[in-house]
Image (cartoon, grey):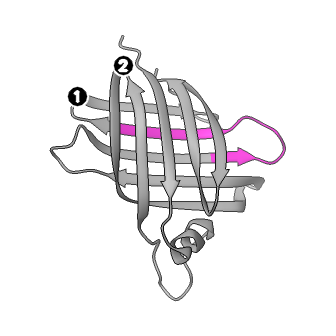
């Protein structure tokens, strides 16, 4: 069984005020406007190998969201690199319940060498373990994740 350690730092750096507003929106507006792209920077280490990527991605933050009736804050980040890139794709969903119960983290990373996943805090089967530190910065912020896949 292969256990890879994840240390991923996501720096979300919106360049425009309109992009920051899209990050805060819980749902795309009824007008049909979709999430706006913004600059995403990723630095991480998976299985002892370092990865760095930056480019266009999407992110969303809802300070007041609901997860099955549980009041929580929500963060979502999606990044897709090129097929030739070492870091091909990253998807992150973090629910932080306001009642102090454990975070619900879903992180999937696809690299040139394979796929990696952490799924914690949910009602179903967990895969691995992870903790998240949230560091707000201006209209964006940084999410630091330390964990291990199953």
Assess whether residue 98 is covered by the magenta stretch: yes
Q: Which residues are magenta?
A: 95-109
Q: Is residue 104 left or right of residue 32?
A: right
Q: Which residue is mark 2?
A: 47
Other-residue count near label 2 (Cα within 10 Å), few / some / many at <14 / 14–19 / ≥20: few
Q: Is residue 135 left or right of residue 29?
A: right
Q: Earlier in the sequence, mark 1 or mark 2?
A: 2
Tag count: 2
Name above or below for residue 119 compared with residue 150: below
Chief secondary structure of the magenta portion: strand
Assess whether residue 25 is covered by the magenta stretch: no
Kindly indicate whether the residue at mark 2 contacts the one at mark 1 (C-beta within 8 angstroms): yes
Q: Which residue: 48% across, 53% down?
A: 77
Residue 150 horizontal/vertical position (percent): 46, 20
Residue 79 horizontal/vertical position (percent): 37, 52
Label disc, if present, on residue 113 of the rendered structure: 1
Residue 128: in sight, yes or no? no
Q: Residue furthest right?
A: 99
> Which secondary structure lies at badge 1?
loop
Q: Is residue 150 left or right of residue 135?
A: left
> Which secondary structure lies at badge 2?
loop
User: Which residue is nearer to you in this view: 137 or 75?
Assistant: 137
Name above or below for residue 69 compared with residue 118: below
Give the quarter of the image for residue 36. Answer: bottom left
Q: Which residue: 66% across, 51% down?
A: 136
Residue 94 horizontal/vertical position (percent): 60, 46
Residue 133 horizontal/vertical position (percent): 65, 37
Q: Is residue 103 left or right of residue 83?
A: right
Residue 104: in sight, yes or no? yes
Label disc, if present, on residue 68 of the rendered structure: none
């Amino acid at each position: 069984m292969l256990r890879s350690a994840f240390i991923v730092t996501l720096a979300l750096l919106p360049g425009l005020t309109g992009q920051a507003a899209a990050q805060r929106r819980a749902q795309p507006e009824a007008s049909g406007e979709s999430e706006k792209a913004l600059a995403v920077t990723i630095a991480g280490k998976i299985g002892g190998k370092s990865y760095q990527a930056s480019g266009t991605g999407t992110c969303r933050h809802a300070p007041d969201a609901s997860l099955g009736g549980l009041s929580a804050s929500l963060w979502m980040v999606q990044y897709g690199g090129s097929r030739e890139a070492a870091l091909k794709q990253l998807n992150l969903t973090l629910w932080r319940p306001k009642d102090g119960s454990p975070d619900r983290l879903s992180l999937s990373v696809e690299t040139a060498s394979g796929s990696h996943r952490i799924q914690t805090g949910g009602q179903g089967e967990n895969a691995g373990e992870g903790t998240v530190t949230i560091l707000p910065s201006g209209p964006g912020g940084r999410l630091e994740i330390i964990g291990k896949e199953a």
